[in-house]
Image (cartoon, grey):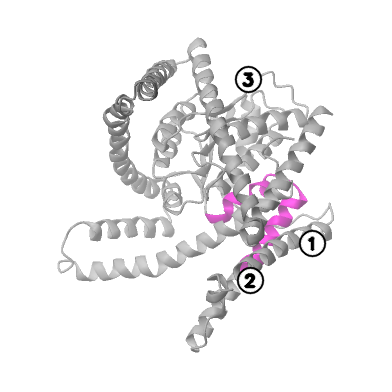
Amino acid sequence: MTLTGFSGIVVVILFVGTMIAFYLIKRDADRTELREIRGYRKLTREIGRSVESGTQMHLSLGWGGITGSESASALAGLSILKQIIKESAVCDYPPVASSGDATVAILSEDTIRDTSQAINIQTGHRSTGELVGLTPFSYAAGTLTTIRSPQVSANVLTGWYGNEVIYLTSAGERQGTPVIAGTADLPSQAIMYASATDPLIGEELFVGGAYLGGGKIYEASVNAQDIFRWIVIGLILLGAVLNLLGVMDPFSSLLGGVR
Amino acid sequence: MNLKFRALISTAIVIGVGVIVLAGYFLPAITAVRFILLRAGLVLAAVALLVGIINLVGIHLRKLSSDQSNSGYSLILVIALTITLIVGAADMFQTYMFGKPNFQMIKWVFTYIHLPIETSLMAVTAVSLIYAAAYILRERLNVFSIIFFFVIILVLLTSFSISSNLLPILQSARNWIVGVPALAGGRGLLIGVALGSIATGLRILTGIDRPYGG
């Protein structure tokens, strides 16, 4: 086994261990003080509004699949979809989920159907997981009709996008419906920051479960992320100091695949 | 009960396969097993594409029958999909039955219909991005938005093919912004995204998040 492989296993085990430790030490009554993220506050409000007005939320899962580096965004979007369904259990219409990848479309349909069944919602509606196009621009063009539907009261864009995301955010703006948007792709994050009403920056996309009432384990996952962030910051600073002192940076060789 | 049993089975399969694939990255001894599972995953993804296209056609046929305001687009989509499917099938038939070369008709469809449409959308994107830059100043006027806007203007100006001798200070400012704060900020965001991705992956691997049902 390479040193990199060994350090990878250690990181994975430590991450899971930290999550479980936070989950166990937290009592049910304890509530983690999470910093406020405007996008999730708005999303919670919009869920309530859609319940009251009998409208639908639209969740766009982007065109990324689940086999590449873009998968985490779509999976985070599916987690948010699940929480939206739970929160809007008494809503007349389940949220509509659009995606540009066939596997994610099937997963979104599964998520809507199984979450509805698990919390005993008798929707009586047809499935609302849609594959709308298989290339970035055809996906954007297909999703525009959903965003422009008068039945849709808010849009949540959580998935993998390219520059074409501007069509989706600006369509929401023209329609007068809020657009809460986050992605893992950096250039698209810049576009979302400029054009979405409520952008989710960086890791904010991945903490939806904790902010939308997913429960203790999601909050424990956010705690673990925070701990590891501080560890990474510490290692970067230590590496910089060692470099300044002329000592060889041990982390470069650790991450560089030395046996 | 049926749902719970199905969820149990699917969760066990996901956790088992996920652990093997993850371990395959770190332990060379099981790399071969990882590749077998990944290949099986790719085959399933290809089948999912077929299911997805059936889903796509079904949704648009429903939109057509329900007389929605956007049903014209659905009609165009169904017609275009049918024609492309027929052209592709004819091409495949010619190639494999008569040995004639080589997906010419479907290439024509992509080169002269699909590609120009996507290229023209790409061109419009540039205009839309400038509109977005103006939108941020109108809707969210604060210090960060103003910095964001002026950095865009600076980078745009210095990216044109104007000689750097004409705008030496701006060029240096651009190089510093792109090389120091933008790079540092980008790396910071990527670290956050990486940690979020690890957390999301591990939640799925441990069965906490189950986007596959249950």
In this image, A94 relative to A154: left or right? right
Query: Residue B151 at x, y = what percent?
Result: 33, 60
User: What is the chain identity of the residue bearing mark 1?
Assistant: A
For the point 49% across and 27% down, which residue is it? A146
What label does residue A126 carry, if any? 3
For the point 35% across and 49% down, which residue is it? B133
Name the residue nearer the viewer: B158 or A101: A101
Q: Earlier in the sequence, mark 2 or mark 3?
A: 3
Pointer 2 residue = A231
Pointer 1 residue = A21
The amino acid beneath tag 2 is Ile
Q: Earlier in the sequence, mark 3 or mark 1?
A: 1
Query: Residue B16 at x, y = what percent?
Result: 73, 47
Quadrant placement of the C terminus of chain B: top right
Decide whether the magenta segment is chiefly helix, strand or loop: helix
Question: Label 2, label 3: how many angstroms apart (C-alpha)?
Answer: 47 Å
Q: Is residue A199 above or below residue B122?
A: below
What label does residue B145 carry, if any? none
Instruction: Tell me, yes or no, whether dots 2 and 3 are on the same chain.
Output: yes
